[in-house]
Amino acid sequence: MKLLTVNFLTCAVKVCKSSAASFPLHFQDAEVEQREMDYNPTFLSNILPRLEWDAIVTVAAELGFTNVPATKPDGNPETEEEQQVMRDLHTLLLETEVVEGKLVCGNCGHEYKIKEGIANFLLPNHLGTPRDVVSSKP
């Protein structure tokens, strides 16, 4: 699971839908790998406006990445320093993957296991939204 993905996830438990504490989900016992990709500045510039920056900073710090800037870059690097920040973000968001561990909700504490880079968001019946069973028989 790429670090970028966590910025678009929230707890699926019904009682967490209205709680601000359900976002971002927090990594626990995370096994992190770096998988090199071609640098894509256009993708980064286009995705930056869609990111909840405070959540990126929080999750990155929890995983030990402390060089994330406190403010979101504008996506149009003009100086060498700004270009390096964009490359570092590319490494963090697109090349950093959590392959094993858990995502934990800050509101209810529900744990979503991550195995082989895939988080399991299926909920037990008692935590999900009840569904009406419709019979197809007359």
Image (cartoon, grey):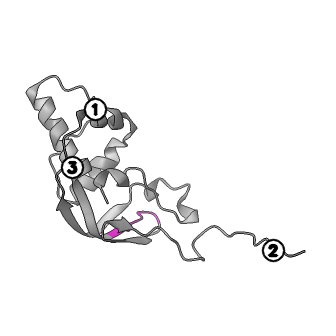
SS for callout 1? helix
Residue 138: quadrant of the picture: bottom right
Q: Which mark is residue 73?
A: none
Q: Residues within 10 Å of mark 2 (few under 14, many from 20)?
A: few
Residue 87 lies, in percent from the top left, at 16, 39
| Residue closest to the eye, 134 or 30 | 134
Q: Disc 2 designates what residue?
A: 135
Residue sitting at x 19%, y 26%: 77
Residue 50 lies, in percent from the top left, at 39, 38
Give the Cα distance between marks 3 and 1.
Answer: 16 Å
Residue sitting at x 16%, y 37%: 85
Q: Please state which amino acid type lies under the numbered disc 2.
A: Ser
Q: Please state which amino acid type lies under the numbered disc 3.
A: Leu
Q: Is residue 16 left or right of residue 68?
A: right
Q: Residues within 10 Å of mark 1 (few under 14, many from 20)?
A: few
Residue 64: quadrant of the picture: bottom left
SS for callout 2? loop
Q: Disc 3 designates what residue?
A: 92
Q: Nearer the viewer, mark 3 or mark 1?
A: 1
Give the Cα distance between marks 1 and 2.
Answer: 50 Å
The residue positioned farthest toward the top in the image shown: 78
Q: Disc 1 designates what residue?
A: 42
47 in magenta = no
